[in-house]
Image: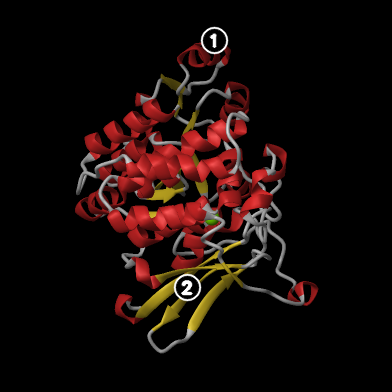
Amino acid sequence: MKKIAILGSTGSIGTQALDIIERNRSYFKIEALSAHNNIELLKEQIDKFKPRVVTVVDKEKAEILKSKISSKTQILVGPGGLKEIASIKNLDMVLVAVVGIAGLEATIAALSTGNDVALANKETLVAGGQLVMNTAKVHGSSIIPVDSEHSAILQCIQGARKKDIKGIVLTASGGPFRGYTREDLEKVTVEDALKHPNWVMGQKITIDSATLMNKGLELIEAKWLFDLDIEQIKVVIHPESIIHSMVEFIDNSVLAQLGLADMRIPILYALTYPERMPSPVESLDLLKLKKLSFEEADLETFSCLKLAINAIEIGGTMPVVLNAANEIAVKKFLDRKIGFNEIASLVKEAMKNHKPINEPVLEDILRVDQAIRKQYS
Ligand code: MG
């Protein structure tokens, strides 16, 4: 039985992971769960999976939960609880599916304990890529990506030698505004931006998909995960979201991973890696699809992708600034305080004003992250 901890068990990835785990109860054992403040759902999960320990980040909500729980489950309180759960000894996998920079600290705690991490938190590798990869190396622990693109690449390189990889192609759906001009984008609303054509996801990542910042963050993650140069990573718009990414080898042979746009496939692969298990997702019907198409990404109109490439080329703490400023900008857009095109403007300004620190340690990353959030909120 695989002993699993899920950080962020009430979110989009967390609930889908539990859906898979519930269908395979003889294979997985839930040791620990965490929620930010959705204690109603967390209580249901405790009743169903009987974890040894849970943590609730919101202190008041944690107290309410304590009064409602009759089982033996231990309840930890506050952000420190995430690290405590991540550091439980001898877990087979810690699924890090929390949103925000808390994911970075939890990932480092898990890796330092020797626990493998199934990673579904963008901040971890975008803000702390070098630090996180070094931590994994030093402690002999692994990071298995949950994101569909990185999962696709991991699947395509099984059995391959690193030196045989020429590069990778990250596919992007193009989001709801594919083909729009900058002028068109001036007029789009929050509701328009939240209508993703293929994937059902949380609000933040849905907006990031509309601006193409999501692909920029994924490009940075891919660089660290697979130890690639930026020149080895291409982005191609693929509106059908059937090919989840590809790897090109030195003989110009290309391997692609295909499947329906359902996160339960990459989540399951991360939890069972390197093995596979039957999934509840439908089979891919190629005859129904008929064709797959590809377009060039428009970096002038969707400048967030270009900013992400700039940030990783500059390196140091610049991707920390990109990530934090983007999160603030997306929140402002969702709160209807700024327009869609101003998301990129805010990120660009924050990057312009930042003097990057090279090879940052955790404290540097957290300090820069906090400073940017304070300055631009
Ligand atoms: Mg993705």
> Going by the image, does 213 lie left or right of 78?
right
Q: Where is residue 243 in the image (x, y as percent from the top left)?
A: 60, 69
Residue at 64% from the left image edge and 63% from the top image edge: 241
Q: Position of residue 123 (x, y in %)?
A: 40, 43
The amino acid beneath tag 2 is: Cys
Residue at 73% from the left image edge and 76% from the top image edge: 291
Local crowd size for mark 2, using a 10 Å CA cut-off: few (<14), some (14–19), many (≥20): some
Mark 2, ligand 1, within 8 Å: the answer is: no
Q: Which quadrant of the figure shows ligand 1? A: bottom right
Residue that mark 1 sits on: 67
Lower sequence index among marks 2 and 1 = 1
Asked if labels 1 and 2 touch by Cβ distance under 8 angstroms, the answer is no
Residue placed most toward the observer, 204 or 185: 185
Residue placed most toward the observer, 177 or 269: 177
Residue that mark 2 sits on: 156
What element does badge 1 sit on? helix
**Measured Cα–Cα span from mark 2 to mark 1:** 48 Å
> With respect to residue 232, does 98 lie above or below?
above
What element does badge 2 sit on? helix
The amino acid beneath tag 1 is: Ser
Say if residue 129 shows up in the picture: yes
Among all residues in the image, which is located at the extreme front?
Answer: 183
Quarter of the picture holding the C terminus: top left
> With respect to residue 250, does 77 lie above or below?
above
Say the numbered circle drawn on residue 316. none
Q: Position of residue 314 (x, y in %)?
A: 29, 55
Local crowd size for mark 1, using a 10 Å CA cut-off: few (<14), some (14–19), many (≥20): few
